Amino acid sequence: MSNRIVVPFGPQHPVLPEPIHLDLVLEDERVVEAIPTIGYVHRGLEKLVEKRDFKNYVLIAERICGICSFTHSVTYCNAIEHIMDIEVPPRAQFIRTIWMEYSRMHSHLLWLGLAADAMGFENLFMNAWRLREEILDDMEATTGGRVIQGTCKVGGIRRDIGDDKLGEMVDHLKKIRPLLEESNRIFTHDQTVRHRMRGLSVLSEKDAWDLGAVGPTARGSGCDMDVRSSGYSAYGELGFKPVTFSHGDCLDRCLVRSEEVLASVDLVGRAVAKMPDGPIEEKVTGNPEGEYFAFSEQPRGECLHYVRANGKKNIVRHRVRTPTFTNVPPLVKLLEGIELADVPVVVLTIDPCIGCCDR
Amino acid sequence: MIEQKHTIIEIEVADLLKKTEEYHKAGHRLVQIGTTPLGDRYEINYTFTTAWDFESLRITVHDGDEIPSISGIYWGAFIYENEIHDLFGITVNGMSIDFQGHLIETRIPTPFKNPPKITKVPKGGDA
């Protein structure tokens, strides 16, 4: 009869970029149960909405996460704009979409680097992060910030991007696209990567759906689930198609992200080609009154911002359901039955963002 | 402007499990459970969807009320229900994993709970 022991994993661990704690119940080297604890970076940002002007709060919403920051600010603004019936100018919607796709590219490249690092593939890690820097350069050139942009506002955006710069961005993406494809080929074909990830921690399509998985975690299991398909911002005009894989293992969750980087390059190209002229913001008067559930597709998956307002400048309630939060139950299931040595890789494949998750 | 269609259905707490079971049988996924504190009461929204048309069941509870867990139907609901317990102090009975208040560790217990009503102590009266 095997003895059961409990091994604490995190919140500080070399492979974890952010703090989550797992109590791993082991039988020999095999995990039989995983019990998560979060809240180490709980900041109560949702509570702060009661003390801030709803327009200024955009900057706080953006700071919920240091990676998908821009998408948080857009989703919050979408909720307010729907409540106040504000029609955001098309050019602003297109530029918001471009910045959201840049966020996705830099987030996925960050993750691909971390995944390579977790497998001990240091060369691939450095290559992914070098490519990420190219993306961040364009973000910085157009917004002034690498990871926190501060360019989204209720009613539109703060900064326009000139047509010359848009052309330069597309040329730059064309230049680095072969490098991204080369990086993807390593994830697809390299023996070490496939040996480490193929067949590991399989999440079936049914389990992904029932457990509430979102984002690449769900799409790697074959769930055709991507909020961009609903056509919010400018996605409805860009012929968006979700990337899905069907094995449901660690490799497919990885491949969804690597393919999505290329899909984002294409989306940016199409957005620039169709970029409308016109203003970049709509004047906002008065205060919001009502409620709205705004959904968006962040790099890690479906995100919800619920806003409830009562006609005053302070919002009554801002509730954020982040993708990592809803991916915790699938993670608990994914960890059951695997070897202890595989835990870091499996935890990373849901791309946990605990800053988002804790808020 | 693209509208993400969302229907809110107000129900009694006693009907929660029955209605949730209906969504589960119809193949909906659980999107989220979220709580809104409104001074003297809390609204709890259970959101479901099959694609991009969302539906939320809304129940209203007060401090001291207890609600049943839907984690017997949607196993992953435990994460939201523990959050409701830890941040708002609402008791959820029958969770598939009960963290006993330790899922979200906060310095102040139940920080999002409705503030207690302040009653004035009469001047000169005995405290």
Image (tube, rainbow, N blue to C red):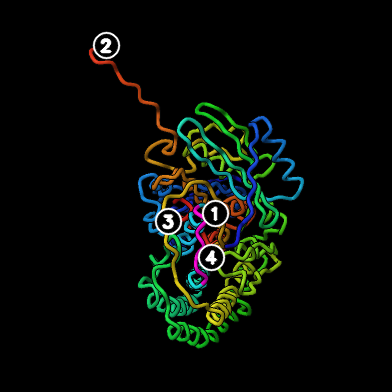
Q: Are marks 2 and 4 on the same chain?
A: no
Instruction: State the residue in front, B54 or A154.
Output: A154
Chain ID of residue with mark 2: B
Q: Is residue A121 magenta?
A: no
Chain ID of residue with mark 3: A
Q: Report which residue position mark 3 lands on.
A: A61
Q: Which mark is residue B126?
A: 2
The answer to whether residue A7 shows anywhere in this view is no
Q: Which residues are magenta?
A: A84-90
Chain ID of residue with mark 4: A
View extreme (right): residue: B25
Q: Report which residue position mark 4 lands on.
A: A299
The answer to whether residue A281 shows anywhere in this view is yes
Q: Are marks 4 and 3 on the same chain?
A: yes
Dot 1 or dot 3: first in sequence order is: 3
Q: Amino acid at mark 3?
A: Ala
Instruction: State the residue in front, B68 or A37.
Output: B68
Name the secondary structure under disc 1.
strand
Label 1, label 2: how far apart the Cα atoms are: 50 Å
A247 on left or right of B44: right
Q: Amino acid at mark 4?
A: Pro
Label 2, label 4: how far apart the Cα atoms are: 60 Å
The N terminus of chain B sits in image quarter:
bottom right
